[in-house]
Amino acid sequence: MKRAVGIFLIVQSLLTYFIMDALYTPFKVTDEIIDTDMKTGVTTVSYESPSEIHLIYIMPMLTFLLGIYFILKSKKKRRLKTQHFYN
């Protein structure tokens, strides 16, 4: 049962991440003109985007890790130790 929940959490977190990545851009790409060559008219433009992890992506990451934990958690079987006393 824990393995099935783990697989569900992993699939759900991946789908959530891909949907968020496709529909939501958490940063605005900024362009900045660096240099313009006056002889040729060629303009050099720099595109920047922040390389930090945004808070909106933390929840799918935690869900993914929880799913991996459920899958890898081994089931410990307990053996009933019975002691027989013979007189």
Image (cartoon, grey):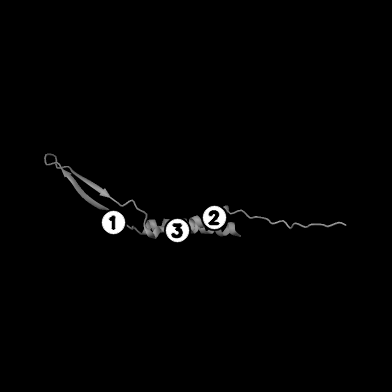
Residue name at image x 43 percent, y 57 percent: 17
Q: Which of 87 and 18 is in front in this view?
A: 87
**Residue 18 percent coordinates (x, y):** 42, 56
The circle on residue 28 is 1
Q: Decide if residue 42 is on the left or right side of residue 59.
A: left
Give the CA distance from mark 2 to mark 3: 14 Å
Q: Which element type, helix, strand or loop, lies under badge 1?
A: loop
Dot 3 corresponds to which residue?
Answer: 60
Q: Which element type, helix, strand or loop, lies under badge 2?
A: helix
Asked whether the beta carbons under mark 2 and mark 3 sit within 8 Å of each other, the answer is no
Tell us which disc is closer to us: 2 or 1: 2
Residue name at image x 49 percent, y 55 percent: 65
Q: Which of marks 2 and 3 is nearer the N terminus?
A: 3
**Residue 14 percent coordinates (x, y):** 46, 55
Residue name at image x 45 percent, y 56 percent: 61
Asked whether the beta carbons under mark 2 and mark 1 sit within 8 Å of each other, the answer is no
Indicate the quadrant containing the N terminus: top left, top right, bottom left or bottom right: bottom right
Q: What residue type is labelled 2?
A: Tyr
**Residue 60 percent coordinates (x, y):** 45, 58
Dot 2 corresponds to which residue?
Answer: 69
Q: Which amino acid does label 1 sit on?
A: Lys
The image shows a total of numbered marks equal to 3
Q: Earlier in the sequence, mark 1 or mark 3?
A: 1
